[in-house]
Image (cartoon, coloured by chain):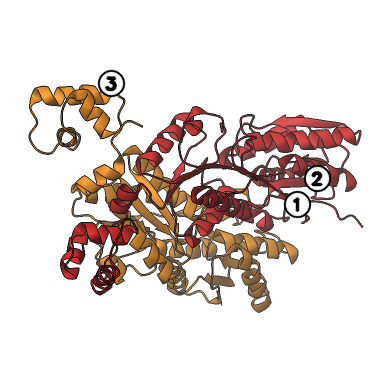
Chain colours: A red, B orange
Amino acid sequence: MTTIKDVARHAGVSVATVSRVINEAGYVHEDTRRKVENAIQELNYTPNEVARSLYKRKSRLIGLLLPDITNPYFPQLARGVEDRMQESGFRLIFGNSDESQSKEQDYIQTFVQNNVVGVISSTNDPGSLSYRSLKIPVVFLDRISSDRPAVYADGREGGRMAAQQMVQRGSRQITVMQGPAHIRPAQDRFQGAIEALQDMGMSYQITQTTSFSFTEADRWARELFEQYPDTDGVIASNDITAAAVIQEAHRLSKRIPADIQIIGFDDTPLSNLLSPALSTIRQPAYDMGRAAADLLIQLIEGTAGEQRTIQMPVQFIERATTRSLS
Amino acid sequence: MTTIKDVARHAGVSVATVSRVINEAGYVHEDTRRKVENAIQELNYTPNEVARSLYKRKSRLIGLLLPDITNPYFPQLARGVEDRMQESGFRLIFGNSDESQSKEQDYIQTFVQNNVVGVISSTNDPGSLSYRSLKIPVVFLDRISSDRPAVYADGREGGRMAAQQMVQRGSRQITVMQGPAHIRPAQDRFQGAIEALQDMGMSYQITQTTSFSFTEADRWARELFEQYPDTDGVIASNDITAAAVIQEAHRLSKRIPADIQIIGFDDTPLSNLLSPALSTIRQPAYDMGRAAADLLIQLIEGTAGEQRTIQMPVQFIERATTRSLS
């Protein structure tokens, strides 16, 4: 590989001069600059990013921390972040936190050691010292923070929408699945649904789930129908649990949506491939990822405006697990 | 943040001495070493990884290149890689290639600029100069290479299994979906299925698909039943297309598995949540990711044995889209 020394020798100048040209720092005579630039081109030299980051104390690396990439909601977020970062020449160091604080801290530490210039994190604890003590910009993604930059969807409104659609489309014995207690967006959508049902004067029942995991979704669905065999409407905590509820309803020979309506949350790609296709509340995950990346780049480059928390709209996607309104 | 200068001052030695201790390079008197180590501990100093990588020309960064993290097969692979890398203190720089050669080359270049010590790639072109000219270890994941380290599943055997199960369970007008032509594993499983059907003397029909995308899966399914309305068995190119075939079969009021059997490929988490749950050929994606990481670490550390291509077994997972054998 060509080194900065080769360039200096080829151009007949010192390494320090080449460095000044590359980093656009300090005075270099126009003729000398041209000689160096020609040498760089002729030798097809690529400055070593590590050396540059040491010199300028700046890399083009961003740390991205998500709970678990195997939950089908998160690849969309990650993809949005990556596509936007790629457009501006940033690269991602990626980690899964598994909602574990120690794993999270461990990652943040190595992000810093690798001189990342910014962090995007879907943490459950935006107020923690790990983040407050960071001297680089942080954007929280899919997580609400009142005093730090954040991009998230309007989960409360999403929950309200799901409840209103259920009632408008005729369900009267509605069951709301409460998602994991430690995940704030799950609680927001749950609260929104409960509020709307109370506003409409509807009775309802609640089941608890403690994870969004594929392997446990079956269990939540079985428990739901054991507790409330006559329910005629399920507001699921996300698309995965909704898929399990569809399966269990089939097993119990309930017709969807004639006997029971089901609404998911997220609009992950799988929801359109279920049978019947799942009506759900759409979070614009890919766009949220892009927006977070965009905000972080602005923060890094010092061009961010006053608006540093971005709430994205949610939307009811009508498919085949709800009855038609007409 | 504590710097190496702080450590040197605290220990009463030069920065060069601290550097020699940290990097275990060059002679340092035992007493001096102890002074430096104490200073490091007292000041809670973490060596800057970038500075270390510049000095030692070694980082703890690995480049991981996958086609598209939003295809639900890949998060499993990525998770396996990450979990194994994390155990050994390596971190991942992550990119999606979208099967585009220019994006792939762009990523490889920035991997090198960031001094990664190894690369794991699911490329369609393991023989390309981009890889052959790399001076760091590369492991191909989910891709076969005869002369370079690689971890992949036995796709051909998977295709054979799917065909044998179809025939044993009574399908006689089998349709095989041929996956994208440029993706080698898709062609392997297709060839395996065709071979097995020919060996058994069965007739069959073929439909083409040109992507594994969620948004196009519906189309492949519609085309399949337009071309072959009487098919009674579908060997899908992956779980996503299988999900679309299930939906389309429902729409056409075909009973699954009584009128038509369907077998997917991959065993992504979604396959168990479909209605009916999908019978499929399982690739051990998570384990493949771990195995690739393991092999790469061995190559980096110079402990790899002769066996540098690892073929992982596939397995038929019986669920509810195939008839029972009894």
Q: Residues within 10 Å of mark 2 (few under 14, many from 20)?
A: many
Q: Which mark is residue B42?
A: 3
The alpha-carbon separation of the residues under discs 3 and 1 comes to 54 Å
Please state which amino acid type lies under the numbered disc 3.
Glu
The alpha-carbon separation of the residues under discs 3 and 2 comes to 56 Å
Tell me the residue that label 1 is attached to: A315
Q: Do the residues indicated by labels 3 and 2 lie within the same chain of the protein?
A: no
Please state which amino acid type lies under the numbered disc 1.
Gln
Tell me the residue that label 2 is attached to: A161
Q: Quadrant of the N terminus of chain A?
A: bottom left
The alpha-carbon separation of the residues under discs 2 and 1 comes to 8 Å
Q: Do the residues indicated by labels 2 and 1 lie within the same chain of the protein?
A: yes
The answer to whether B231 is drawn above or below residue B290 in the figure is: below
Q: Chain of mark 2?
A: A
Residue located 72% across and 56% down the image: A277
**Residue A84 in view (yes/no):** yes
Quadrant hosting residue A107: top left
Q: What is the x, y in percent for residue B310?
A: 30, 55
Do the numbered discs 2 and 1 sit on residues whose CB atoms are within 8 Å? Answer: yes
Q: Quadrant of the C terminus of chain A?
A: bottom right
Q: Does dot 1 land on a helix, a strand or a loop? A: strand
> Which tag is nearer the camera, tag 3 or tag 1?
3
| Nearest to the observer: residue A272 or residue A74 | A74
Q: What is the x, y in percent for residue A67?
A: 52, 40
Q: Chain of mark 1?
A: A
Q: Which mark is residue B162?
A: none
Please state which amino acid type lies under the numbered disc 2.
Met
